[in-house]
Image: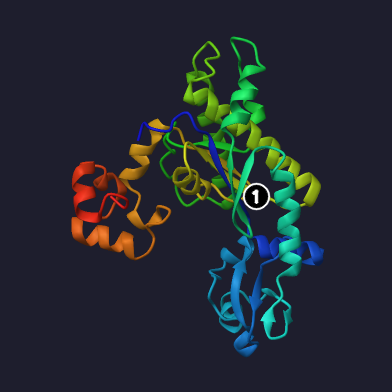
């Protein structure tokens, strides 16, 4: 796990991208429960994207429109246009190109899908650190949408509470975690230090996401860590419109309760096979097996 700490990698994921595109086309949909459907109109079509307002009512991808409206009567449905019997994704691809164009100014980009991209921020982070003086200190306000995974434990649940109380508590925990992380950074600017490089990467991603929002109107979430798998993993921890920094020291505790299928490339048959053959459920358990045994059981490349 300690290999590759010199790298800074981010995964940026557009929040409910198809919904956002439809909301930009029709601003009346903003702030309302809505979903995007495609193909057959039978039973309202098949839902492929759901706004967070609709998710709160139990609407999920894969539902039919009619079924979803039973859970959320006010649900607004937007339909993907068709051309020659196929879904016409032109406006979504154009929106994606706009977003990727902004992101490419901040790092080396690798598109993962229409609404996701990886960025190698290693060089950009190192250059950022080269330009600062010794004794570099980051104001916590510059990391205003950043969570640092594993730095502080959530407070115990205090009754049911309402959504406002929950959001305020989460924001309090976020700020405390960021400040604790910044306080833990070495007093001198060691450009090779993985903690400082990740922090510089998080600053760059904050700037990039703000630029995407300002120039395109689209919101996105991000994960920042040392490789693609960890960046992908932490990107989904604090959506929407937030980013999560995952330092190497926080990975073991996160893995202790993380199902194997949640890891990139282990969500299908391979993950099921690993869990069955090794009689385990969590990534933390997989960590207990020596690399030689994994190579012997699953082949050198996969192991």
Crowd tier of the residue under label 1, counting other residues whose Cα lies within 10 Å: few below 14, some 14–19, many 20 or above: many
Rendered residue at 49%/48% (across/down): 232
Query: Residue 206 location in percent, x, y?
Result: 66, 36
Left or right of 89? Residue 111 is left
Left or right of 209? Residue 259 is left
Above or below for 293 versus 171? below
Query: Residue 161 location in percent, x, y?
Result: 51, 50
Rendered residue at 65%/15% (across/down): 132
Split into 4 quadrants, where in the image is the N terminus? Answer: top left
- Occupied quadrant, residue 135: top right
Above or below for 69 versus 168? below
Left or right of 201? Residue 148 is left
- Occupied quadrant, residue 63: bottom right
Residue wearing tag 1 = 220
Above or below for 146 versus 238? above
The residue nearer to you, when weighing 156 against 98, is 98
* Whether residue 159 can be seen here: yes
Query: Residue 109 location in percent, x, y?
Result: 63, 45
Tally of numbered discs: 1
* Whether residue 22 can be seen here: no
Query: Residue 198 location in percent, x, y?
Result: 53, 30
Callout 1 secondary element: strand
Rendered residue at 66%/60% (across/down): 17
The residue nearer to you, when weighing 135 against 180, is 135
The residue nearer to you, when weighing 160 against 196, is 196
Q: What's the coloring here?
A: rainbow
Above or below for 68 versus 231? below
Rendered residue at 26%/47% (across/down): 286
- As drawn, the residue found furthest toward the bottom would be 42
């Amino acid at each position: 796990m300690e290999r590759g700490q010199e790298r800074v990698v981010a995964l940026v994921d557009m929040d409910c991208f198809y919904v956002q595109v439809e909301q930009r086309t029709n601003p009346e949909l903003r702030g309302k429960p809505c979903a995007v459907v495609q193909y057959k109109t039978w039973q309202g079509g098949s839902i492929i994207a759901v706004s967070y307002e609709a998710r709160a009512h139990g609407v999920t991808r894969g539902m039919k429109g009619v079924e979803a409206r039973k859970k959320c009567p006010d649900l607004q449905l937007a339909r993907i246009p068709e051309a020659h019997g196929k879904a016409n994704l032109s406006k979504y691809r154009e929106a994606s190109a706009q977003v990727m164009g902004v992101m490419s100014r901040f790092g080396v980009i690798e598109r993962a899908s229409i609404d996701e991209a990886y960025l190698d921020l290693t060089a950009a982070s190192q250059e950022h650190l080269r330009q600062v003086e010794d004794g570099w200190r980051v104001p916590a306000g510059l990391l205003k949408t950043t969570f640092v995974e594993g730095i502080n434990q959530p407070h115990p649940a205090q009754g049911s509470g309402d959504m406002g109380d929950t959001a305020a508590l989460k924001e309090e925990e976020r700020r405390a975690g960021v400040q604790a992380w910044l306080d833990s950074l070495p007093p001198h600017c060691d450009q090779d230090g993985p903690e400082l490089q990740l922090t510089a990467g998080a600053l760059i991603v904050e700037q990039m996401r703000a630029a995407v929002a300002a120039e395109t109107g689209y919101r996105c979430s991000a994960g920042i860590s040392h490789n693609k798998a960890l960046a992908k993993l932490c990107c989904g921890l604090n959506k929407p419109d937030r980013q999560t920094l995952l330092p190497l020291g926080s990975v073991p505790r996160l893995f202790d309760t993380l199902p194997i299928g949640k890891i990139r490339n282990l969500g299908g048959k391979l993950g099921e096979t690993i869990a069955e053959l090794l009689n385990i459920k969590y990534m933390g358990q997989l960590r207990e097996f020596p690399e030689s045994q994994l190579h012997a059981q699953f082949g050198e490349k996969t192991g």
